[in-house]
Amino acid sequence: MVLGRRKRTTPRRRTHAWHETKLMRDDVLRVIAHDAFPTDVDGNRLPLPADFVMGIGGATRTLLDLIPPGHVGRALDIGCGSGAITVFLDADRVIATDIDARALEAAEVTCHISGFRKMEPLVWREGDRIIEFRQGSLLDPVQGQRFDLIVSNPPFVIGGVGHTHH
């Protein structure tokens, strides 16, 4: 009797496990949590789900290279996604916003696996640095506040049908 593998015809479902990518910058190592690109059983890429959290790409690396050097008091990361930019900002306090709750979950995991300590829900600390995540559209969560540095790496791949970016 010969046993063969039965070919699956349904796509793999995403699990809640995050993929991790290491990124070194100025002698600082961070680990970024993100989704893996969905594939079918043959390894072909599938359309991205609406709540897909991107990892580190060329745009992320370029933005990191363009951030002016030096320490600031307050920084803002608009549309923080996985937190890849957030964890590298050299500021006493970083506020990071995103409209997507899953992105904020990934950003918190990024803080955890990069060595930050959770102070309270959505607030992380590393030494004297504090990162606070806020859910909301663009500048809505920080209306009326001032920042010394503002960065944004907005999504250029829009999620599934019916998903709206504000």
Image (tube, helix red, strand yellow):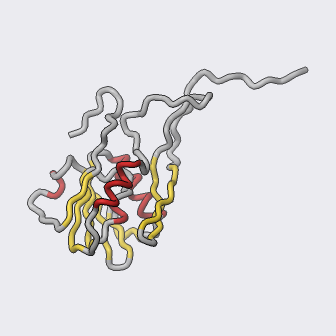
In the image, residue 36 above or below residue 135:
above
In the image, residue 101 above or below residue 113:
above
Q: Nearer the viewer, residue 155 or 164?
A: 155
Question: Which residue is most to the bottom?
Answer: 128
Q: Nearer the viewer, residue 114 or 26?
A: 26
Q: What residue sits 40% from the left and 45% below the top?
A: 53
Q: What residue sits 25% from the left and 53% below the top?
A: 152
Would residue 49 appear left or right of 11 to someone viewing this image? left
Q: Quadrant of the N terminus?
A: top right
Q: Position of residue 144 (x, y in %)?
A: 8, 60
Question: Which residue is most to the left?
Answer: 144
Q: Position of residue 85 (x, y in %)?
A: 34, 58
In the image, residue 145 above or below residue 139:
below
Q: What residue sits 54% from the left and 32% below the top?
A: 39
Q: Quadrant of the C terminus?
A: top left
Q: Quadrant of residue 88?
A: bottom left
Q: How many marks?
A: 0
Would residue 43 appear left or right of 85 to someone viewing this image? right
Q: What residue sits 39% from the left and 48% below the top?
A: 58
Q: Position of residue 129 (x, y in %)?
A: 32, 74
Q: Quadrant of residue 65?
A: bottom left
Q: Nearer the viewer, residue 110 or 15?
A: 110
Q: Position of residue 17 (x, y in %)?
A: 52, 48
